[in-house]
Structure formats: structure tokens, C-alpha cells
Image: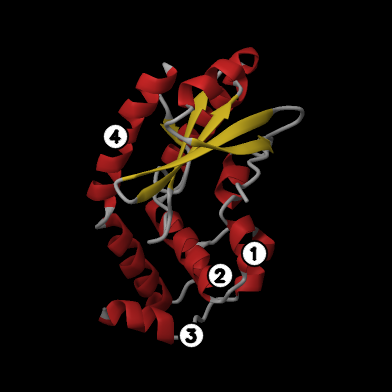
Amino acid sequence: MADQMDMADVPTSLDLDAILDARWADPSVFSAEEFARAERFWQQRRAEDARLLAVRQAVTEQITAWTGRVPRDVGSLGIQTNLETSDLDLGIGYPVAERDRLMAALDGHATFLGERKTRFDTSRLVFGFTSGGVEIDLSALTEEDFAVACRMLNEIATGMSEPERIAHTWVKYLLRRAGRLEDYAAWKLVTYARFCPEFNWVPIT
């Protein structure tokens, strides 16, 4: 509790506008004190990993049984930039011509949230449900887009350092704390854009 109060009460020394303009949180611009706070916050999120990963494993098995496709974590938990309020974002590849079959397979299991533009002339279908007290968003991408997303996630896994994950997560927290919700929504996507510029990952609204 004391840590949470410290994070809420102490002003940041970061120039958030400059970081937004740069479209990246460089840990080298953090003071030692600021980075220590960011790291403490990030480690608090990691303390929740076991619970969230157990939920993810359970819903992965459910989605696989419902759809015949094994989902991939395409959200912030998968790249370790999640906040305490983050949900789980999973994705599958599915043939566009068979989306009616997918809708039928998920009927009664998940709520259809709509169709979202993804990149170029493609789209994804978005479904939602809750498991273990955690909100789950499931995106059904085209098979090509799913392959691109998996490649992007693999590049993030190997190319984004732990200090960068800490810095990115802290900036996301600060933007939300400041009520800068448009900037917050855009910031959530900068990692994907950095590692896969051609992929237009439109957020769920």
C-alpha cells in the first residue's frame, strides 16, 4: 500500500510530451530515482504473473477446444508491459471465408464485440468473455495477419530489453494516472509499431 501511495503522490520528473514525440521510452532519460520507482511498479506487476498465466492457460485450452485454433497472447501481458488493470488479449488466425463458422463456434461462449480494421484491407473479429475474474478479448485475424503478428511478437521478445519494458510500462501508468486517455491509448500501441511498422493494430474501443 505504501508503494502505491508513493507512486500516486510523487510527481514524475519525466517529460512525457518529449517521450510521446519520440514514440519510445528510453531508460537512459530516467533519473535513478524515477527508474527505481518504475522498476518497483513493474516488479509488482510480475508478482501477478502466476495468477494471470494460469488464467491464460485455462482460456487457451477453452479457445482451442471451441475454435480448433491455438491462440497467442497478443497483449501487454505477453510482452510484460501490463498494468494492474490490464485484461488478456489473445489472437487466433482464422480463414475469412469461414468466419460464419467461427461465430457459431463461439456463440454462447463469448460476446461478439465487432469487426475492427487491422491493416491495409483486412479486419479482425473481436470477441469478449470473462474467466477467473479477468476480462478476455479474443481477436480472430486473417491467417496472414496472424502470422505477421506472431513474427512481430517474436521480435519484441528478443529485441525489447527488460529496462525498456519497465520504462514503457511506467510511461503508460503515468499517462493513465494523468488522465491523458488518448495519449494512453496511443502509447499502448507504440511497441507494436516499433517492431512491426506495417501492422496497424487498431485498439478495441
Measured from the top left, where is residue 132 in percent x and y?
A: 29, 46
Looking at the image, is mark 3 or mark 2 earlier in the sequence?
3
Residue that badge 4 annotates: 57
Looking at the image, is mark 1 or mark 3 earlier in the sequence?
3
127 shown above or below 1: above
Residue that badge 1 annotates: 183
Q: Is residue 182 left or right of residue 139?
A: right
Which mark's residue is nearer the viewer, 1 or 3? 1
Location of residue 119 by image quarter: top right
Q: CA distance from mark 1 to mark 3?
A: 18 Å
Residue that badge 3 annotates: 11
- Dots 2 and 1: beta carbons under 8 Å? yes
Question: Under tag 2, what secondary structure?
Answer: helix
Q: CA distance from mark 3 to mark 2?
A: 12 Å
- Residue in view at x 35 percent, y 73 percent: 36
Q: Is residue 40 left or right of residue 150?
A: left
